[in-house]
Image (cartoon, rainbow, N blue to C red):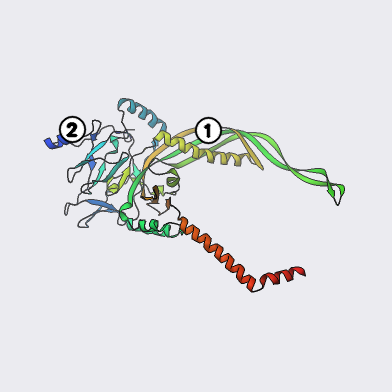
């Protein structure tokens, strides 16, 4: 597990007296942590990852540098062994997730901090892209990711098309899509789980049969007997075992966005994961996980349970199924910690925050939006007016009179 858990923390040295004074003024529980920054060899300016060219591109001179891609398999890690190692590390080297990480900009020297659950972004003073070491706050580092596939301009076009398809959206919402500074690229943390499951079950198989039933009824004032067919179910106790293998059950490890949005960004092309490299992160924000690996597995079990019960019902067969007990055993359970790209923005409308998120690979968009009650009211009034106009035309053309004459025949 040495490749997954790396306890060595690298700290940015404080060389000058002023730097030491600045650091002393920081919160007592703050830390200065290591960070990555990529500079152009041609002009010294910042390099950021370009999804369109899949290179690092200089913000000033436009020079391109190929990303140092690693040719290696995407690693899976043993889940049970990871829990044991995590328990040991948390007792020997506890990490306070509420600590403030003090970051020193490699370009202008300013000290600042990211949001609590971010480890990559820009210096607020000079906009230099900075990527910090995730080992500062979390034991498990991301080992693979999906790079962004399209630029911000394309993301804005996707949002324009999406909001344009919602006629009842307020006009101010449409104008918001023109504010490019609100849209940011973020790598969100996810867990994936593989597991071989063995599921013993007990239940009942129901077979439908039909019973003839004689009943009395009144017809034309006389009581008569009739025969009807009544469906019934014959239940039989059953038991068995269903074995299912689960591959890449995906669980979002971020709490900054609603689960209803994150879960509906699927599907993700996880077959195209690449080994983690800070070069892909440069110019984007990136979050550290807020849902731990064991918490994520509990959510994954809920997803697995639904599919397991579907398979059990199929195995029981018959016309109806009852499941009374299921005993699930997991073996060879592995996981990955991956980063997946999204374009995200939020806006205020009448005191409420609305978010929308775009899958940075396939352009799938999910979001919250307000409704314009003025537009809804106008639509209702228009519909009523159209209905009244239609009735008037039908009346003046004698349609109703013709219908009455037709019914009289």
Residue 109 point in image, percent of width and height: 17, 43
Q: Residues within 10 Å of mark 2 (few under 14, many from 20)?
A: few
Q: Position of residue 118 (x, y in %)?
A: 31, 41
Q: Please, what secondary structure does the residue beneath circle 1 have?
A: strand
Query: Residue at left 48%, top 40%?
Result: 246
Q: Which residue is mark 2?
A: 24
In-front residue for pair 196/389: 389
Q: Is residue 291 above or below residue 392?
A: above
Q: Is any atom of residue 16 visible in this view?
A: no
- Viewer-nearest of labels 2 and 1? 2
How crowded pointer 1 is (Cα within 10 Å; few <14, some 14-19, many 20+) is rated as some
State which quadrant residue 143 falls in.
top left
Instruction: Quarter of the image for the C terminus: give it.
Output: bottom right
Residue 299 point in image, percent of width and height: 46, 37
User: From the viewer's perspective, is 26 left or right of 306?
Assistant: left
Residue nearer the viewer, 322 or 401: 401
- Kindly identify the residue that appears in the image at 74 percent across and 71 percent down: 405
Which quadrant of the view contains residue 144? Answer: top left
Q: In this view of the protein, can residue 371 be seen by the observer?
A: yes
Instruction: Please tell me which residue lies in front, 250 or 174.
Output: 174
Q: Which tag, 2 or 1, sits closer to the chain's start?
A: 2
Q: Quadrant of residue 291?
A: top left
Query: Height in image: 235 above or below 176?
Result: above
**Which quadrant does the N terminus fall into?**
top left
Task: Please tell me which residue is depicted at 30% across the width and 35% down the height of the picture.
Answer: 137
Which residue occupies 21% across, 51% down? 46
For residue 123, which numbered disc appears in the image?
none
- Horizontal side of 159 relative to 95 (left or right) equals right
For marks 2 and 1, give the CA distance. Answer: 54 Å
Q: What number is the disc on residue 328?
A: 1
């Amino acid at each position: 597990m040495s490749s997954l858990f790396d306890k060595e923390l690298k700290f940015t040295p404080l060389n000058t007296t002023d730097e030491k004074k600045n650091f002393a003024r920081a919160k007592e529980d703050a830390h200065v942590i290591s960070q990555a920054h990529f500079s152009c060899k041609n002009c010294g300016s910042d390099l950021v990852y370009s999804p369109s060219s899949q290179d690092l591109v200089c913000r000033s001179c436009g020079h391109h540098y190929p990303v140092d891609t690693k040719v290696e398999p995407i690693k899976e890690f043993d889940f049970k062994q990871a829990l044991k190692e995590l328990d040991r590390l948390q007792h020997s080297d506890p990490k306070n997730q509420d600590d403030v990480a003090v970051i020193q900009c490699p370009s202008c020297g300013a000290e600042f901090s990211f949001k609590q659950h971010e480890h990559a972004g820009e210096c607020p003073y000079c906009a230099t892209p900075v990527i910090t070491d995730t080992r500062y706050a979390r034991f498990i580092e991301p080992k693979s990711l999906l790079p962004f596939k399209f630029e911000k301009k394309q993301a804005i076009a996707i949002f324009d098309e999406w909001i344009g398809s919602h006629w009842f959206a307020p006009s101010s919402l449409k104008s918001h899509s023109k504010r490019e500074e609100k849209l940011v690229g973020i790598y969100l943390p996810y867990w994936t789980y593989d597991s071989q499951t063995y599921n013993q079950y007990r239940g009942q198989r129901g077979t439908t049969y039909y019973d003839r039933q004689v009943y009395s009824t009144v017809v034309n004032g006389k009581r008569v007997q009739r025969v009807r067919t009544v469906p019934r179910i014959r239940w039989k106790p059953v038991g068995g075992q269903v074995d299912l293998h689960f591959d890449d059950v995906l669980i979002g490890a971020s709490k900054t966005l609603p689960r209803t949005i994150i879960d509906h960004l699927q599907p993700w092309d996880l077959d195209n994961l690449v080994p983690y490299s800070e070069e892909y992160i440069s110019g984007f924000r990136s979050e550290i996980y807020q849902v731990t690996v064991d918490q994520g597995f509990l959510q994954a079990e809920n997803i697995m349970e639904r599919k397991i019960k579907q398979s059990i019902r199929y195995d029981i067969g018959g016309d109806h199924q009852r499941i009374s007990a299921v005993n699930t055993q997991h073996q060879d359970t592995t996981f990955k910690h991956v980063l997946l790209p999204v374009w995200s923005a939020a806006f205020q409308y009448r005191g409420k925050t609305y978010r929308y998120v775009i899958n940075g690979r396939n352009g799938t968009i999910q979001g919250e939006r307000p409704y314009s009650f003025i537009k809804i009211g106008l639509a209702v009034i228009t519909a009523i007016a159209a209905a009244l106009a239609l009735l008037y035309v039908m009346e003046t053309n004698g349609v109703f009179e013709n219908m009455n004459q037709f019914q009289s025949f």
